[in-house]
C-alpha cells in the first residue's frame, strides 16, 4: 500500500502541480488587483453581519464549516511535516501560498455562489456545479464530483483520524496490542476509533444544519484556545523570536533541505492546510445566505488568512522556538538537523506536542491531543458535507436512493481505518486526494475565467454598488452577461 501511494504521489504532486497552485494564486491576485488586501476591512464587516435562513447558513457558519475543513491536522501535524522534510524555510512558502491563495479562494467561492442551486429547500453548489454551468463540460464536472467523493469520502478522512489516534497514544500509551485483520493494532487506537466513529455517525445523520451548528461553536473556540497557548509559549521565549524569523526567511532561499524540498513541502502542506484552489471551500461557500456572490467570496478569502497566517504560524513558531524538530533528508533516514529522538515521526502531531510539553509540563500532550481531536474531527465533518454535495450533484442525473447512506458508511469506515493505521500510509492517501482535486479544480477555474470571468464581473459589480452606497446589495447575472446563474435570476424576479 505504501509503495502504491508513494508512486501515485510522485505523479500527482510533480513540480507541475506545485507551480500551478502558486501560479494560479499570483494570476488571480493580479487579475483582482489583490482583492485579499484591498477588501480586508470589508471581509471583517461581512463576517460579523451575515444571517442564516431556512435554506442557507450564515456567512459566519459557512466560514466555520469551511474553516473546519481548513483548520485541521494540516495545521498541527502538517506544519511539523513541512519543517521535518522541507526545513524551516518551508514555513515561508506556506505563507506565500496563503497570501496568493486567498485570491484563488475568492474566485472559486464566488463562482460557487453564482452558480449554486436550491434543491429540496437547501442550497447546493461547488466546483462540479460551476464547471458544468460556466464551462459547459458536464463530463469534467462528473470527473471532479467522482474524484471529490473518493478524496473526501475515503482518502482524506484517514489523515485526520490518524492524527487523533497518534496524539491519544502519545498521552495514554499504546495499551495492549492485539492481532486483527488489519494487522497488529494498539487497543488505545481501537477505543479512540470507536468513539470517533460513533460521534461522527450521530452528527452526519443529522444533516448540514447540525454540522454547521457544531462547527460554529467548536472551531472558533479551539482555534482561539490554540493561539492563546501558542502566544504564551512564544512570549516565554520572546528573545528567540527574531532568530526564528531569520531562520525561516534565510532557509526559504538557501534551504538546508534543498530548494525543491522547501518549496515543494511548503506548497504541498500549504495547500493541504488552507485548501485554496483545492475545491473544498466552495461547497460551504455555496451554502451561505448572502445578498451578493462576491460577499461570500471575500469571507472565504479571509478564512485562508485565519488558517495559515494565524494557526499554522502559531504551530511553526512553537516548534522552532523550542527547537522541537528534526530535518530529515528526503528519501533517506539521515538527518540534516536533529534536536529530538530520530524515531519520532514528522508526519504526526508529536513535534507540536513535544514543543508544548517542554514549556507546560503535563499539559502539552493532552492539550494538543484535545485540540487535534476537535480540529481533525470537524475537518472530517466538513469532508462529509463536501462529499454529500457531490453525491447530490450525481443524483441530479441518476437517482440512487442508497447512495447517501453508502457515503456515510464509507466515511465512517475510512475514519476507523485511518485511526488505527500507520501515519505515512494515511498522509500519502490524503495527498493523493488533495492532489486530484487541486488539479481538476484549478484547471477548471482558470478555464472559466478565460471563458466568462464570472467571479471578476461579480467583484466589479459589488465594488460599483459599494461606491454608490447602496443599502441592500443585489445581483443581476443577465446584466453582467453571466449565463446559467438560474438561482440569482429567479431571486431577482421575486
Image (cartoon, grey):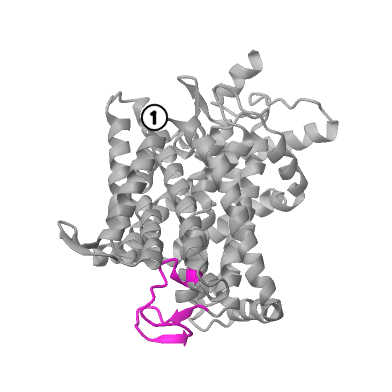
Does residue 487 lie above or below 276 as drawn?
above
**x and y percentages locating residue 138 in the rendered image:** 40, 33
Residue 150 is at least partly visible in this image:
no
Does residue 404 lie above or below 251 as drawn?
above
Between 368 and 395, the residue placed more toward the observer is 368
**x and y percentages locating residue 77 in the rendered image:** 46, 64
Image quadrant containing the C terminus? top right
Residue at position x 52%, y 84% in the image: 256
The residue tagged with tag 1: helix, strand or loop?
A: helix
Is 166 on the left or on the right of 460, as rendered? left
Does residue 460 lie above or below 245 as drawn?
above
Between 110 and 66, the residue placed more toward the observer is 66
In the rendered image, the residue lying farthest to the top is 494
Residue at position x 38%, y 46% in the image: 152
Residue 359 is at least partly visible in this image:
yes
Which portion, as a residue range, is magenta?
A: 324-353
- In the rendered picture of this protein, how many numbered marks are placed on residues? 1
**x and y percentages locating residue 176 in the rendered image:** 23, 64
| Magenta stretch: dominant secondary structure | loop
Image quadrant containing the N terminus? bottom left
**x and y percentages locating residue 236 in the rendered image:** 67, 75
- Decide whether residue 113 is among the magenta residues: no
- Decide whether residue 345 is among the magenta residues: yes
In the rendered image, the residue lying farthest to the front is 362
Residue at position x 30%, y 53% in the image: 191
Is 457 on the left or on the right of 80, as rendered? right
Between 17 and 187, the residue placed more toward the observer is 187
In the rendered image, the residue lying farthest to the right is 468
Residue 329 sits in which quadrant? bottom left
Say which residue label 1 marks: 392
How packed mark 1 is, by other alpha carbons closer than 10 Å (few <14, some 14-19, many 20 or more), is: many
Amino acid at each position: 500500500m505504501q509503495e502504491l501511494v508513494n508512486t501515485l504521489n510522485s505523479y500527482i504532486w510533480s513540480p507541475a502541480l506545485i507551480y500551478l497552485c502558486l501560479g494560479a494564486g499570483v494570476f488571480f491576485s493580479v487579475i483582482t488587483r489583490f482583492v485579499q488586501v484591498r477588501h480586508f476591512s470589508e471581509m471583517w464587516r461581512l463576517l460579523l453581519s451575515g444571517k442564516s435562513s431556512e435554506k442557507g447558513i450564515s456567512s459566519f457558519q459557512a466560514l466555520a464549516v469551511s474553516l473546519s475543513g481548513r483548520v485541521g491536522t494540516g495545521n498541527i501535524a502538517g506544519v511539523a511535516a513541512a519543517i521535518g522534510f522541507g526545513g524551516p524555510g518551508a514555513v515561508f512558502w506556506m505563507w506565500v501560498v496563503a497570501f496568493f491563495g486567498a485570491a484563488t479562494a475568492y474566485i472559486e467561492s464566488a463562482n460557487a455562489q453564482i452558480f449554486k442551486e436550491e434543491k429540496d429547500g437547501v442550497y447546493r453548489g461547488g466546483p462540479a456545479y460551476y464547471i458544468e454551468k460556466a464551462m459547459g463540460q458536464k463530463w469534467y464536472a462528473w470527473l471532479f464530483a467522482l474524484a471529490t467523493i473518493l478524496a473526501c469520502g475515503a482518502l482524506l478522512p484517514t489523515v485526520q483520524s490518524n492524527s487523533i489516534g497518534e496524539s491519544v497514544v502519545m498521552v495514554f500509551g499504546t495499551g495492549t496490542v492485539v492481532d486483527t485483520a488489519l494487522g497488529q493494532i494498539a487497543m488505545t487506537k481501537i477505543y479512540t476509533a470507536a468513539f470517533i466513529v460513533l460521534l461522527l455517525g450521530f452528527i452526519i445523520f443529522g444533516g448540514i444544519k447540525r454540522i454547521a451548528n457544531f462547527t460554529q461553536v467548536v472551531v472558533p473556540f479551539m482555534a482561539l484556545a490554540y493561539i492563546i497557548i501558542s502566544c504564551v509559549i512564544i512570549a516565554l521565549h520572546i528573545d528567540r523570536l527574531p532568530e526564528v524569523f531569520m531562520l525561516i526567511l534565510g532557509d526559504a532561499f538557501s534551504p538546508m533541505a534543498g530548494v525543491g524540498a522547501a518549496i515543494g513541502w511548503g506548497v504541498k502542506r500549504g495547500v493541504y492546510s488552507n485548501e485554496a484552489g483545492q475545491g473544498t471551500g466552495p461547497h460551504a461557500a455555496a451554502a451561505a445566505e448572502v445578498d451578493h456572490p462576491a460577499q461570500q467570496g471575500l469571507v472565504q478569502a479571509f478564512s485562508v488568512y485565519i488558517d495559515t497566517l494565524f494557526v499554522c504560524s502559531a504551530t511553526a513558531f512553537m516548534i522552532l522556538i523550542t527547537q522541537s524538530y528534526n530535518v530529515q533528508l528526503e528519501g533517506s533516514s539521515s538527518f540534516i538537523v536533529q534536536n529530538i529522538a530520530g524515531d519520532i515521526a514528522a508526519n504526526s502531531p508529536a513535534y507540536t506536542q513535544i514543543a508544548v510539553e517542554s514549556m507546560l509540563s503535563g499539559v502539552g500532550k493532552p492539550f494538543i491531543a484535545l485540540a487535534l481531536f476537535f480540529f481533525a474531527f470537524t475537518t472530517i465533518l466538513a469532508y462529509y458535507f463536501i462529499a454529500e454535495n457531490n453525491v447530490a450533484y450525481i443524483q441530479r442525473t441518476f437517482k440512487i436512493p442508497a447512495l447517501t447512506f453508502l457515503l456515510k458508511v464509507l466515511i465512517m469506515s475510512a475514519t476507523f481505518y485511518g485511526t488505527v493505521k500507520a501515519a505515512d500510509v494515511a498522509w500519502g492517501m490524503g495527498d493523493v486526494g488533495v492532489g486530484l482535486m487541486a488539479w481538476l479544480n484549478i484547471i477548471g477555474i482558470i478555464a472559466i475565467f478565460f471563458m466568462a470571468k464570472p467571479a471578476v464581473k461579480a467583484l466589479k459589480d459589488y465594488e460599483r454598488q459599494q461606491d454608490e452606497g447602496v443599502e441592500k446589495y443585489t445581483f443581476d447575472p443577465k446584466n453582467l452577461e453571466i449565463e446559467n446563474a438560474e438561482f440569482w435570476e429567479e431571486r431577482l424576479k421575486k
